[in-house]
Image: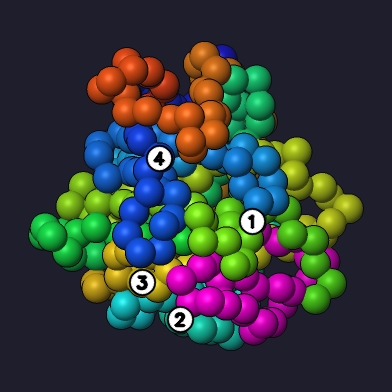
Amino acid sequence: MTNPRVKMSMALVALATLGQTGAQASTVLNLTTQDASVSATAAIGGTFLEVQNADLKSATGIFKPFVRLEEKVNEQGFNTDLGTPYDTKAGPWTHAIKLSDIAIEKINGIDYRVFNLGINQDQNAPDNQFSLSQVQIFQTAQDRLDTGVTQIPLTTAPVIAFASSTEVFRMNNGGDSAFYETQLNAGLSHGNATGDMVLFVRNDNFKTAYGDNVILFSQFGHEPGVYLTNGGFEEWGVNGKNQPPTTDNGPPIDTPEPSTLVSAGIAGLMVLGYRWRRGKAKSAA
């Protein structure tokens, strides 16, 4: 029985092509079309899934923000109660979170922790394209305010390190010219009161022995991504207090190497696309 707090309606959508783009020669995770879905293998943390979704409500709705970032051209930062590192915005939407705050979803027999992203960029073409080039997740015994980002050269993804922590997920290694670049389309967004992407990270990466505090570092814009930040804030959020995994949601999602992927229009390869629905929250909105 599906958890009543989290309802998913499933639709078959074409697998977004992972291609090469621009001078950075990044490997593109293309979420620029409605309900696009991609899967890839992280530098740390195994297979991860990303789903475009403009139906998530944030702040007072479906997901609760824990960090906001805002800067022109590019931006980076992480959640903490101890300050506003880099481009993090002060306020009640930026704070420390615990492992128990992060929901779990079961997909193809695998449990994933769920992180929601809301973007707030120019919605008019051609400025509506938007790049996400790094996500790192750490567990620590206590909140931290470290500022040790390395980005050499600038055309590769930045990497941050925290003392006395365990890194459980890293989308990209530093210095890798073929880094994953998630490209999003702000034109699909409903504004800064909604979410735009769901990131699924394997639950078996997380261990209680690593500590209950969870830190998420992310970087958006150019460089190293092709598309810069040009609007308002971005925010990461969670679905609320943890709950038992929902029932399995669909058939296996393949994770081919980027070099083996072809467009769905040519190959007819299909995967599940996820649209998140919270009936109670939506009716209350």
Check disc 1 and give the amino acid type: Arg
CA distance for labels 4 and 2: 29 Å
What residue type is disc 2 on? Answer: Asp
Out of 252 and 211, give the one closest to the viewer: 252
Residue assigned mark 1: 170
Give the vertical position of 183 relative to 65 (above or below): above
Estimate the x, y position of residue 56 in percent, counting from the top left.
35, 44
Q: Earlier in the sequence, mark 4 or mark 3?
A: 4
Q: CA distance from mark 2 to mark 1?
A: 20 Å
How far apart are labels 1 and 3 at the CA level? 19 Å
Give the residue drawn at x 46%, y 71%: 155
For residue 222, the mark is: 3
**Cβ atoms under marks 4 and 1 closer than 8 Å:** no
Percent coordinates x, y for residue 282 in the rendering: 31, 38
Query: Do residues under tags 4 and 3 come within 8 Å of each other at their CB atoms?
Result: no
Whether residue 57 is situated above or below residue 229 in the rendered picture: above
Indicate which disc residue 18 carries: 4
Label 1 element class: strand
Q: What span is in magenta?
A: 136-162
Q: Quadrant of residue 145?
A: bottom right
Q: Earlier in the sequence, mark 1 or mark 3?
A: 1
